[in-house]
Amino acid sequence: MADALFTIRRSLHYERCSSAAAMRSAARRRGRAAVALLALAALLAPWLPRGARTRLALAGQSPAALAHFLADFSNHARLHAHTTGPWQVEEESNNNTCWRYAVAYECGALCVGRATVAACDANARLSHGASDRHRVQFSDRRCWGLPALSWPRLCESLETDSVIGPRAAGGAWLEEQAYVQCSLLATVVGHCDVHAARLLHHRALREALG
C-alpha cells in the first residue's frame, strides 16, 4: 500500500513539474513572438520623413485642364496601382475659396485607404474660376494588417503640393513638392527614393493625359 501511495505522489509531482515546464516554455514562446512583432513593427513603421521637389512641363495642356485632372480622384486611382477596388466620397466642402473632399478606397486584402484632395486657384478664388495659376494638394494614407492579427497595423503615406501655371511657349507647367513617411526597412534597401518615384509618376501622368 505504501509503495502504491509513493508511486501516486511521484506521478503527481512529475505531472506538476511537467505542467510548470510547459507553461514556462509557452510563456517564453509568447515572449519571443511579442519581441518579433515589435521588431517587425519597428522595421515597417513609417517614421522617416522624405521629400522631393520636381517640375513637369506639358505642352498640350492648359493650366485649368491639368488642375481639373489632378483634382479628380478617379484620375489618381488610375495613376496609383495600389487603388485596386471601389472608392466613395466621405466628405466634401466648398467655401468659395477651395474645393475639398475626402474619399475612402480599397487597396487589396486587409488594406483600407483614405485620400483627401484640395483644389484652389493661386489667387484664392474658386478653383474652377478664371485664374491661370492653380494649386492642388493631395494626401493619401493606406494601412493594412497581418492575417489573424489585430496589431501591428502597417501604413504608408504620401502628400503632394502642386502649383500649376502657364508656359510662355504654350501649355502648362507643374511644380510639385512631395512628402512621404518611409520605414527603416524601405530606406535601408533603397525603396524610398522619392524623387525617382515621382518622376515615374509624372511619366504615367503624361501618358494618361495623352
Image: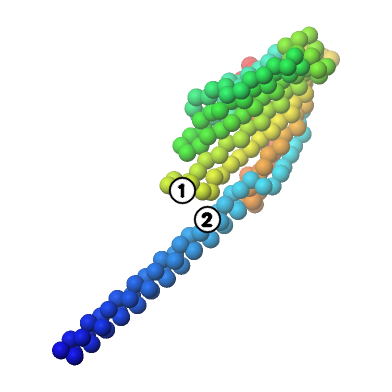
Instruction: Return the x and y of residue 165 as percentages of the image width and height.
Output: 79, 18
Q: Label 1 crowding class (10 Å Cα cut-off): few <14, some 14-19, many 20+?
A: few
Q: Mark 1 or 2 closer to N-term?
A: 2
Q: On the image, numbered disc 1 is attached to which residue?
A: 149
- The amino acid type of the residue labelled 2 equals Leu
The quadrant the C terminus occupies is top right
| x 44%, y 45%: residue | 147
In whole angstroms, how far apart are the C-alphas of marks 1 and 2? Answer: 10 Å
From the viewer's perspective, tell me whether residue 106 is left or right of residue 126.
left
Q: On the image, numbered disc 2 is attached to which residue?
A: 37
Identify the secondary structure beneath mark 1.
Answer: loop
The quadrant the N terminus occupies is bottom left
Q: Is residue 192 above or below residue 26?
A: above
**Contact flag, marks 1 and 2 (Cβ < 8 Å):** yes
Q: Is residue 13 above or below residue 208?
A: below
Identify the secondary structure beneath mark 2.
Answer: helix
From the viewer's perspective, tell me whether residue 155 is left or right of residue 135.
left
Instruction: Return the x and y of residue 135 as percentages of the image width and height.
Output: 76, 22
Q: Which mark is residue 20?
A: none
Instruction: Return the x and y of residue 111 as percentages of the image width and height.
Output: 51, 37
Regarding residue 71, the answer to whether it shows in the image is no
